[in-house]
Amino acid sequence: MYEAIKNFSAQFLFEPKIENETELPAATHFVVAGMGGSHLAADLINIRIPELKLAVHHDYGLPLFDKDAYKENLFIASSYSGNTEETLDSYEKARAQEYAVAAISTGGKLLDYARRDRVPFIQLPDTGIQPRAALGFSTRALLKLFREDSALHETRSLGEHLKPEEFEEQGKALAERLRGKIPLIYTSRRNAPLGYAWKIKFNETAKIPAFCNNFPELSHNEMTGFDRAASTRDLSERMCVIMLKDARDGERVQKRMDITATMLRERGVSVEALTLKEGIGFYTIFSTLLIADWTSYYTALYYGVEPEEVPMVEELKKRITLHGTDTN
């Protein structure tokens, strides 16, 4: 895992190639179907290019769109392994409805289906890393299918300018302050995918519970969980709020974040405020996630757990298979 984080920026030098490109429609709307790390890239692109008509689906089947709406959509099945049960189900249902379909994967059944059906696909490099660590590859592949040439150029520059080692000490220091705590990642609504990405890195890499929420919604419910009585003090003290602050967020949201941080500290809750770098697009997104990578990596070392593999996920797949459902 250490090497995957250290060499992350090299992923942005990947030049995605569309196979069966003549079958790729000139779509104006997009749906990306994927689970876990395989849909994260689409979530992050939504932050950077909010005007892009992009929906993300992480479930079996298809989103509940009117059938006519699919005429303008390119449906992209994204599975890093190519064997994700839910994504294969979505792919097959989209094909059955004769929707325009494309695929992204390192291989597996998904690319077998794409070759069989002669649909456009991009094969990702299979470097043996986990899907959550392959966001550079996935982002570049999606941007290619979206025909977002300017964003492709921007992300390619990260291969030279994004230096993972520059964020290691910050992540290591944050991991030390998080010892014995359950992370809660709070963001604005627009940055909710960043909070979710931080959460799953703690879950998968550090093997600890972690949760996320966003403003202004949490101001109306979740924060009251910290208005503690003596009988709940121990619960609150186990939490540490990581607040991802962004100068691009609305003034009222920023005010809520600042006041909430003060109120939480007054109630004895640990709060770590992290300010995103201003105005530099994908660099801001991925530099923030590198801090999450390093923090979760050093948290894993502190607890003595292996940071890369996800044994509980694999155990679940095996148990489902034993109960008669093919998870491949």
Image (cartoon, rainbow, N blue to C red):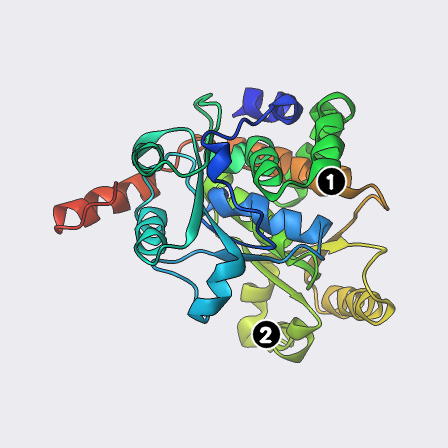
Residue at image mark 1: 282
Q: In the rendered view, does 56 fall on the left or right side of 305?
A: right
Taking depth in this image into account, of 112 and 279 the one nearest to the observer is 112
The residue lying at 34 percent from left, 43 percent from top is 84
Residue 293, picture quadrant: top right
Three-letter code for the amino acid on which mark 1 is drawn: Phe
User: The C terminus lies in which quarter of the figure?
Assistant: top left
Q: Is residue 199 visible?
A: yes
Q: Position of residue 143 (x, y in %)?
A: 62, 39
Query: Is the residue 91 above or below the residue 256 in the image?
Result: above
Q: How crowded is mark 1: few (under 14 residues within 10 Å), some or many (20 or more)?
A: many
**Please, what secondary structure does the residue beneath circle 2 have?**
helix
Q: In the rendered view, does 178 fall on the left or right side of 264?
A: left
Q: Residues within 10 Å of mark 2 (few under 14, many from 20)?
A: few
The residue lying at 30 percent from left, 55 percent from top is 96
Three-letter code for the amino acid on which mark 2 is drawn: Gly
Measure the alpha-carbon separation of dots 2 and 1.
34 Å
Number of numbered labels in the structure image: 2
**Please, what secondary structure does the residue beneath circle 1 have?**
helix
The residue lying at 59 percent from left, 58 percent from top is 239
Residue at image mark 2: 225
Residue 255, picture quadrant: bottom right
Residue 176, picture quadrant: top right
The residue lying at 40 percent from left, 39 percent from top is 119
Disc 2 vs disc 1: which is toward the camera?
Answer: 1
Q: Earlier in the sequence, mark 2 or mark 1?
A: 2
Q: Position of residue 196 (x, y in %)?
A: 57, 53
